[in-house]
Image (cartoon, helix red, strand yellow):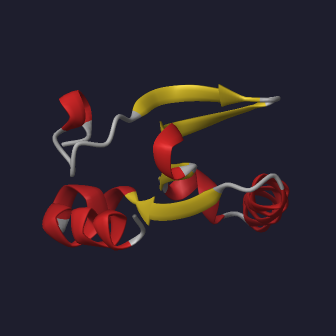
């Protein structure tokens, strides 16, 4: 749904590198990072790492949205509405 500027004409890059991080999706015009997380992100160590990473990226001026895999698969329209609302 993010391919070919289908979402409000915004261009998203998949697996985009920012400094020493690789983000799932990135929209340069909005400085928006979208992360799609599976169960591997549920451990306390992973949560701490994600929080530190998000804080670093926010300090660099990026906005970050995180969604669970289940949300993307089962509630795609809601996910897309949340992304649009961040524009």
Quadrant in the rendering for residue 18: top right
Viewer-proximal residue, 40 or 48?
A: 48
Q: Is residue 57 above or below residue 86?
A: above
Q: Position of residue 85 (x, y in %)?
A: 34, 73
Q: Position of residue 82 (x, y in %)?
A: 32, 72
Quadrant in the rendering for residue 11: top left
| Residue located 41% across and 62% down the image | 68
| Residue located 48% across and 43% down the image | 29
Quarter of the picture holding the N terminus: top left
Q: Position of residue 34 (x, y in %)?
A: 48, 51
Quarter of the picture holding the C terminus: bottom left
Q: Position of residue 16 (x, y in %)?
A: 57, 27
Total number of numbered labels?
Answer: 0
| Residue located 59% across and 38% down the image | 23
Viewer-proximal residue, 37 or 39?
A: 37
Say left or right for 10 vs 31: left
Say left or right for 82 vs 26: left
| Residue located 24% across and 62% down the image | 80
Say left or right for 17 vs 80: right
């Amino acid at each position: 749904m993010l391919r070919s500027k289908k979402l409000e004409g915004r261009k998203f890059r998949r697996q985009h590198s920012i400094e020493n991080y690789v983000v799932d999706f990135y929209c340069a015009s909005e400085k928006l990072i979208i992360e799609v997380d599976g169960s591997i992100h549920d451990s306390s160590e992973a949560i701490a790492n994600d929080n530190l990473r998000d804080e670093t990226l926010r300090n660099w001026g990026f906005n970050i949205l995180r969604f669970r895999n289940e949300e993307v698969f089962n509630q795609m329209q809601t996910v897309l509405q949340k992304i649009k609302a961040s524009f």
